[in-house]
Image (cartoon, rainbow, N blue to C red):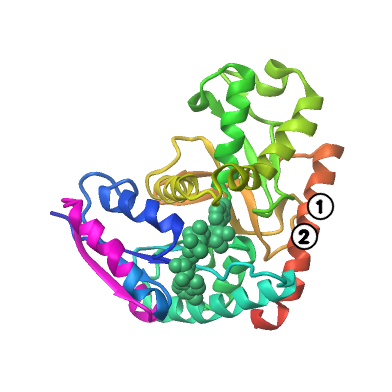
C-alpha cells in the first residue's frame, strides 16, 4: 500500500469542514487507492467540537483514513503536509469595518504562513478558502518565503461551478460539455464570470445562447450574488457546495483537468494586465500535478472594464494589509 498522504485542514470545527472532511476521508481528493491522514487545526475553544467531528469520522469506518490528528498548533497541523486546505478564518462580526476584517485575517494568515514555511513539505499543495480568500492567500505566501509561491492558491472554483450550471441550463447543454469558461479576479461580488471563450461541442456559448443582455445583466450578477441567495434561502452560508469546490480544485490540481480550463486563484505574473503579485482568479489547465495559466488572450472593452473593477478591489485589499506583506 502507498504511504499515506497528510492533509492539513484548518477551521475543522466549521460548516464547510463538516462536509469537506468526510469527502477527503472517502478518497475524493487523492483517489480510491490512496490512504490519508487528516491533520485538523482549529482554535483552542473549538477543540471539543473538532473531537466530535472526529468521532463521526471514526463512525464512518472509512478504509482510507488511517489516522486523524487534532491540534490548535499550526506547526503541528502543517507538519509534513502533502496538501492543505485553509478554511478557517475570522468571520465579520457586527459593526466590524472591512479594513478590520482584512487585518484580523491578515494576522491569522501571517502566523499560519510562518508555520507552513517551517513544517510543510516543499511540494505541498495549498488552497485558501477562508475569506477574504485571495488576500489571505497572498499573505500566506508572503510569510512562507521558503515555500514555493506557485503552490499557494485561492479558491474561486465555487464561482466557476456556479457559472457552469447556469450556462449549461440556459444553453441546454450538459455541464460536463462546457470548456473554456473563465472566472477572473476576487472571490467577491466583483468576480468576473467570462463566457467570451466558452464553448460546448465546438460552438461558442455566446452564439448558442445569443443573449448578451442575459449574460451581462443576469448571469454575471447572479453568480456574484449566489452566496447571498443561499444565505437567504437556507439561513446559513453555502457549505457543501464550497467543500465540493475545494475538492474539485485540489483533485484537478493533483490529477489534471483533462485539458479543460478550470479557474484557480494564483499568484499573478503580470499577464493579461493583472498587477504582478496579486492572488487572482484566472483560467488554468491542470496537468501532471501542476497548473499552467492560460495566456495570450486579448480582451474587448467589456472584459477590460470588468477586469479593472476586480483588480481595483484586490489592490485596495493589498493596500489595507501592506504592513503584513513584509
Ligand atoms: P465557520 O464559521 O462555520 O467555520 C470557521 C471555523 O474556522 C471555525 O470552527 C473557527 O473556530 C475556525 N477558525 C477561526 N480562526 C481560526 C484560526 N486562526 N485557525 C484555525 N481555525 C480557525 O465558517 P465556514 O462556513 O466553514 O466558512 C469558512 C470560511 O470559508 C469563511 O471565511 C467563509 O467566508 C469562506 N468561504 C469561502 C468560499 C470561497 O469560495 N472561497 C465559499 C464559502 C465560504
**Residue 112 % position (x, y):** 48, 77
In this view, the residue in front, 232 or 179, is 232
Q: How busy is the neighbourhood of tag 1: few (under 14 within 10 Å), some, or many (20 plus)?
A: some
Left or right, residue 224 beside residue 26: right
Q: Is residue 57 magenta?
A: yes
In this view, the residue in front, 229 or 140, is 229
Which stretch is magenta? 50-78
**Residue 71 % position (x, y):** 33, 77
CA gap, disc 1 and disc 2:
6 Å
Residue at 70 percent across and 72 percent down: it is 96
Q: Which mark is residue 256?
A: none
Task: Indicate the quadrant where residue 79 lies.
Answer: bottom left
Is 159 located above or below residue 274 in the figure? above
Task: Indicate the quadrant where residue 74 lies.
Answer: bottom left
Q: Tell me if I can see residue 148 in this picture.
A: yes
Q: Which mark is residue 313?
A: 2
Is 127 located above or below residue 303 in the figure? below
Q: Regarding mark 1 in the picture, which secondary structure is present there? A: helix
Q: Are marks 1 and 2 in contact (CB under 8 Å)?
A: yes
Is 195 located above or below residue 36 in the figure? above
Check disc 1 and report the residue beneath it: 309
Left or right, residue 34 beside residue 251: left
Whether the residue carrying mark 2 lies under 8 Å from ligand 1 is answered with no
Q: Is residue 68 magenta?
A: yes
Amino acid at each position: 500500500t502507498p504511504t499515506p498522504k497528510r492533509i492539513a485542514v484548518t477551521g475543522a470545527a466549521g460548516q464547510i469542514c463538516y462536509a469537506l472532511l468526510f469527502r477527503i476521508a472517502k478518497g475524493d481528493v487523492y483517489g480510491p487507492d490512496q490512504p490519508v491522514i487528516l491533520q485538523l487545526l482549529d482554535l483552542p475553544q473549538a477543540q471539543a467540537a473538532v473531537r466530535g467531528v472526529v468521532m463521526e469520522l471514526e463512525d464512518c469506518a472509512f478504509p482510507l483514513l488511517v489516522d486523524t490528528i487534532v491540534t490548535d498548533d499550526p506547526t503541528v497541523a502543517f507538519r509534513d503536509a502533502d496538501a492543505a486546505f485553509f478554511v478557517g478564518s475570522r468571520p465579520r462580526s457586527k459593526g466590524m469595518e472591512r479594513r478590520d476584517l482584512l487585518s484580523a485575517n491578515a494576522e491569522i494568515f501571517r502566523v499560519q504562513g510562518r508555520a507552513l514555511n517551517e513544517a510543510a513539505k516543499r511540494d505541498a499543495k495549498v488552497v485558501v478558502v477562508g475569506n477574504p480568500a485571495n488576500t489571505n492567500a497572498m499573505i500566506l505566501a508572503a510569510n512562507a518565503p521558503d515555500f514555493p509561491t506557485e503552490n499557494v492558491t485561492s479558491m474561486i472554483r465555487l464561482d466557476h461551478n456556479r457559472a457552469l450550471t447556469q450556462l449549461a441550463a440556459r444553453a441546454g447543454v450538459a455541464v460536463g460539455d462546457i470548456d473554456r469558461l473563465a472566472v477572473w479576479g476576487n472571490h467577491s461580488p466583483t468576480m468576473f464570470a467570462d463566457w467570451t471563450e466558452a464553448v460546448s461541442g465546438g460552438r461558442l456559448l455566446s452564439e448558442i445562447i445569443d443573449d448578451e443582455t442575459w449574460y451581462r445583466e443576469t448571469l454575471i450578477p447572479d453568480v456574484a450574488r449566489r452566496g447571498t441567495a443561499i444565505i437567504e434561502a437556507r439561513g446559513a452560508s453555502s457549505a457543501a457546495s464550497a467543500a465540493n469546490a475545494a475538492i474539485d480544485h485540489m483533485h484537478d490540481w493533483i490529477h489534471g483537468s483533462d485539458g479543460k480550463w478550470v479557474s484557480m486563484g494564483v499568484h499573478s505574473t503580470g499577464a493579461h494586465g493583472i498587477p504582478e503579485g496579486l492572488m487572482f482568479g484566472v483560467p488554468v489547465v491542470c496537468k501532471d500535478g501542476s497548473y499552467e495559466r492560460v495566456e495570450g488572450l486579448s480582451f474587448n472593452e467589456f472584459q477590460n472594464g470588468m477586469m479593472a473593477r476586480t483588480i481595483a478591489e484586490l489592490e485596495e485589499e493589498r493596500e489595507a494589509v501592506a504592513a503584513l506583506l513584509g
